[in-house]
Image (cartoon, rainbow, N blue to C red):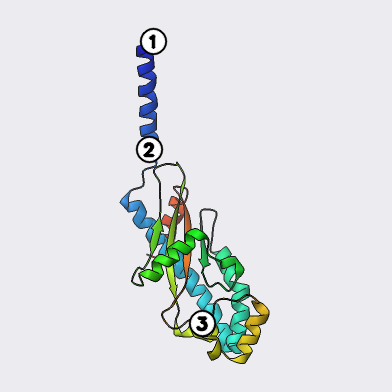
Amino acid sequence: MKRLTLLLIILAVTIGCNKQTEQHTTTNKDLTILTQASEKIINTFQRSLKGELMTAMKAGGATNAITVCQQKASEIASTQSTNVYSIRRVALKNRNTNNKASQKEAEILERFAKDPKMGSFTVSDFSKDSSSVYQYYKPIKTGKFCLKCHGPVESLDDDVKSVLTEAYPNDNATGHTVGDLRGMFVVDIKWPEAREVVTALLADSI
């Protein structure tokens, strides 16, 4: 009798665990949604920041753009993040100390550096916890427009050097040429909590 009771308990626990795993299984469709949502979050951030920088550049040149970027970049990232997803920028050669890559992020940046054709990298493990974080990484390449503030030091205007020295005493984000890996975007999405939000986010683009 005791043996039968023990077997029934084990069977009940096993079924319960299987149900929990099945409940939180992430399908290929979910991963597609997460990838598409991450791309949209990044694109929205890029458009917003580029718009601010272009306006600042026209109004007061590169020095004005540096000031605006210092004030607006983190503000835009904060505004465009929610309680279930967020966007950040990180780099090995960072300008803002808040954007310094962690050890894990540095390893992913090294992957991008070794394979310039790699367009993105994801980290996701939904099998262990009922709530997990999907992480999406996308490289930031140096464009011609970026060189006014991120190019080789000897090519920067004197007023740009002066503003950078004052605004970022420990600046490491110069010395780039067109096409260089300058950093990467990091999107964190809580799953499955964000399912409704990211589905609505994608629906807005249709």
Question: Can you name the residue that lies furthest to the left here?
Answer: 28
N-terminal of the two: label 2 or label 3? 2
Left or right of 13 in this view: 145 = right
C-alpha gap between disc 2 and disc 1: 29 Å
Q: How many marks?
A: 3
The mark closer to the camera, 2 or 3, is 3
Q: Does residue 40 appear in this view?
A: no
Pointer 2 residue: 21
Q: Which residue is rendered at x = 52% and y = 78% of the image?
A: 51
- The vertical placement of 2 against 185, above or below, is above
- The vertical placement of 144 against 13, above or below, is below
Q: Which residue is rendered at x = 47% and y = 48% of the image?
A: 193
Pointer 1 residue: 2
N-terminal of the two: label 2 or label 1? 1
Pointer 3 residue: 175
Mark 1 is on which residue type?
Lys
- Locate the C terminus by quadrant: bottom left
In depth, the one of 61 and 93 nearer the eye is: 93
**Residue 41, image x, y percentages:** 46, 64
Mark 2 is on which residue type?
Thr
- Locate the N terminus by quadrant: top left
C-alpha gap between disc 2 and disc 3: 49 Å
The mark closer to the camera, 2 or 1, is 1
